[in-house]
Image (spheres, helix red, strand yellow):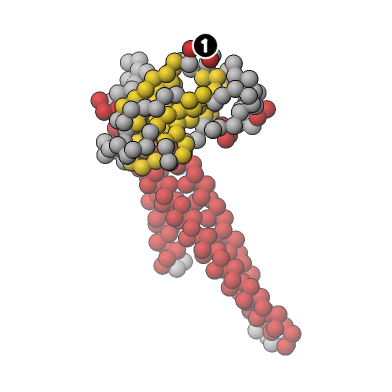
Amino acid sequence: MTSIGLVLAVAFAVSAAMATRAEAAECMTAQACFDKAASQRAAARDFFNQGVWFREYSKQYFVLAEEYNRIARFAFAAGNPQAGWAKAAADDFSTKAVENANAADERFRQAAFTSAAADASFERGLLIGDGSLAIASSSGGFCDTALHHPSDPDAFGSGAPNSYACVRNKHWIRVCDRHVDGNRVRAWFNSNIDRPAVDGPWATQWAPSQGCVTHNVGLKGNIMRYRVCVENQGCSRGVYFYDDGGIWKDVSWIPKDEAGYIWPPWP
């Protein structure tokens, strides 16, 4: 193993250990959840960087394999006894190229998984809440589910995304803007009585800077999907309520036939 390969192996071991420790215990306070999310995001970045390195190694090994295959063909044509050695070297480089490509794919998968875990940790922190984020508490707070916007860090110094929306009892949706940057925040949602591909999505009011706005959907039924949007920064992923099991899932994960609903396009 080359010295660079050894460094990568050690880096992977450290990142894997960080991710394992982060997953080992459920965070019980808001700050613990935010700290856990920060650790998971760091691990995800490490996994992604390792994937880039392994992918680059794979490309280099493929180039070497092609070069030695070319040498082998010329050697065979010339009756050079070194042809067999060149072909063996080409096969070895080709094997290493495939191994490194597979390693890159695995690191990218780990990066995506760990990044999703960081989102879950952060959103659990929102649901638990504390003095600076008081939207919920373990003794019966506002939200049953929360969704954050992956925008620039907030003004509270936690390193967490700055804006979010959350839903209680599928009737109330709350939107909070935690960063003074001139960009307003609101949420878009659909209910269970909207006509497929026709009604909605509906928008909440804009949240005041460093404050929240709460919206009751009233006669529009139960909130079935929502996402949070920031001016000039786009929108978060969307989630929808999956009745079978009573859980919220990413819209992107759910095929239309499983959802049983044809969603109108987001604005």
Instruction: State the image coordinates of residue 156 (x, y, percent, origin top left).
Output: 26, 36
Query: What's the amino acid at mark 1?
Result: Leu
Based on the displayed image, in which of its 4 quarters is residue 11 positioned? bottom left
Instruction: State the image coordinates of residue 18 (x, y, percent, origin top left).
Output: 37, 45
Q: In this view, does 22 lie to the left or right of 238?
A: left
Q: Is mark 1 on a helix, strand or loop?
A: helix
Residue at (51, 63) in percent of width and height = 56
**Residue nearest the observer in this picture, 63 or 92:** 63
Instruction: State the image coordinates of residue 102 (x, y, percent, origin top left).
Output: 57, 55
Residue at (59, 19) in percent of width and height = 194
Residue at (30, 23) in percent of width and height = 134
Q: In this view, does 50 lie to the left or right of 60?
A: left
Residue 35 to residue 15: above or below: above
**Mark 1 — residue?**
219
Q: In this view, does 42 lie to the left or right of 243?
A: left
Residue at (45, 34) in percent of width and height = 229
Whether residue 147 is visible: no
**Residue nearest the observer in this picture, 203 or 14:** 203
Residue 222 to residue 104: above or below: above
